[in-house]
Image: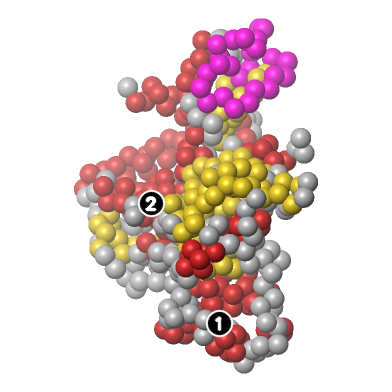
Amino acid sequence: MYICTSSVVHSPPVIIKLHPSAGQPLYLQLMQQIRHAIETGVLQHGDLLPGIRTLAEELVISHNTVAKAYSELEHEGLLELRHGSGAFVFATRAMKSRAEKVRSAQDRVHELVADLRSERLSEEEIHRLFEAELFYSAPVAKE
Amino acid sequence: MNNPYVIETQELTKRFKQFEAVRSVSLRIFGGQITGFLGRNGAGKTTTIKMLLGITHPTSGSGTVLGHRIDIPKESVEMRKHVAYVGEDKQLYPYMTVEELIRFTKSFYTDWRPDLERQLLKRYELPPGRKIKSLSKGMRTKLALLVALARRPALLILDEPSEGLDPVSVEDLLQSLVRTASEGTAVFFSSHQIEEVERIADRISMIDQGKLVMDFSLDQFRMNYRRVILGFASQPPTAGSELFRMAGIDHVRADGRQITILSSHNAEAILEQARHCHAVSVDVQPITLREVFLEKVGADN
């Protein structure tokens, strides 16, 4: 749902796109995208995200959604909320190694998808395979 | 008073001669949230709202808005001091200018906030000297919002606020609602536009043919509602199967060797059970609000 360019001077623009019709709460989508931006380095330690109200208004979503995402991310230690001034990104070294992991995973997924394509599987089929795999393996992954 | 609800009704009913416009509606609308009141045209949204505001008297049932009984005129008057309402028909007073309407409206309220009035006038870019009759529908909506919000009400009720607006004006409206809610006003708005409701609402109350058919938080809905499509290479489980008696199953459809289950929760356990029944293919998809809306209210049965 649109580009959120923060109005705060030192803050980098973050592209956030939420899907209201997807089967995932908006606050989780928002969390994932912010986390992803931190993992990939688009958001870095000390960067400032807009305050709850401002972001809610920019994304045209309920402030409760932003508040919940921010507070969970704060709980995870990725954000530090400052009353009235927004949310500071808190990226540690562990995050950086995780960022590398994500990048290498992305390369592997890229190769796999290219392989499947060359075997003439359609986008739709690949998509469904991934989704089915994730749904199926979800309980296993918890063990 | 520790009531988390800004609106609470019990079995609210309105009958017009033979026609029951609203039937036993028990609503619970939380404070601090945006609630969408979703239903088709003629589902009973406007009648319900009018009863909440004390404009129409319920045939039976009762309710409170901000703790004030809606069926007692004196309490209703007290309630209206803290509730702002933007009606379907935003004609306002066509012969007045923007400035005149604002001056006229504020004379009724002791808690009018001139600072908010100026802020909103600037944000909405309303031309003070323009006659209301020559304002676009989008501008008229903004003006209606301005006079509603300049008192910073505890609760804002809107009846089909986006009706007849162009996409840009709808966006402005939704943004205003989001902002209003973030400043502490509970927002309750009716609409038949699924897309706008699902974007900004925290909760949804769905009404059809005068009855409340669903009432849920959108987070819960997105998290839990699933369509499970099972394929079988042999005889699929029959109606008596344990699979179909599991919790969370809303609806089951069988087409040959394929079975489609709509579940309101518990999709993982349903999947687990399906594997016990030797399903050879399994597909789990999220369900959109549109699909549920069409399923619940689409068919005229």
Q: Is residue A38 visible?
A: no
Q: Is residue B154 above or below residue B91?
A: above
Q: Which residue is mark 1?
A: B105
Q: Which residue is mark 2?
A: B3
Assign a secondary structure to mark 2.
Answer: loop
Q: Name the residue: 70% across, 83% down.
A: B94
Question: Residue B249's spot in the image, x, y percent?
Answer: 56, 24
- B34 relative position to B4: left or right: right
Q: Is residue A142 above or below residue B77?
A: above
Q: Name the residue: 44% across, 81% down.
A: B110
Rendered image quadrant of residue B173? bottom right
- The magenta stretch spans residue B253: yes
Residue, far top:
B234
Assign a secondary structure to mark 1.
Answer: helix
Circles 2 and 1, Cβ within 8 Å, touching? The answer is: no
Q: Name the residue: 52% across, 26% down.
A: B248
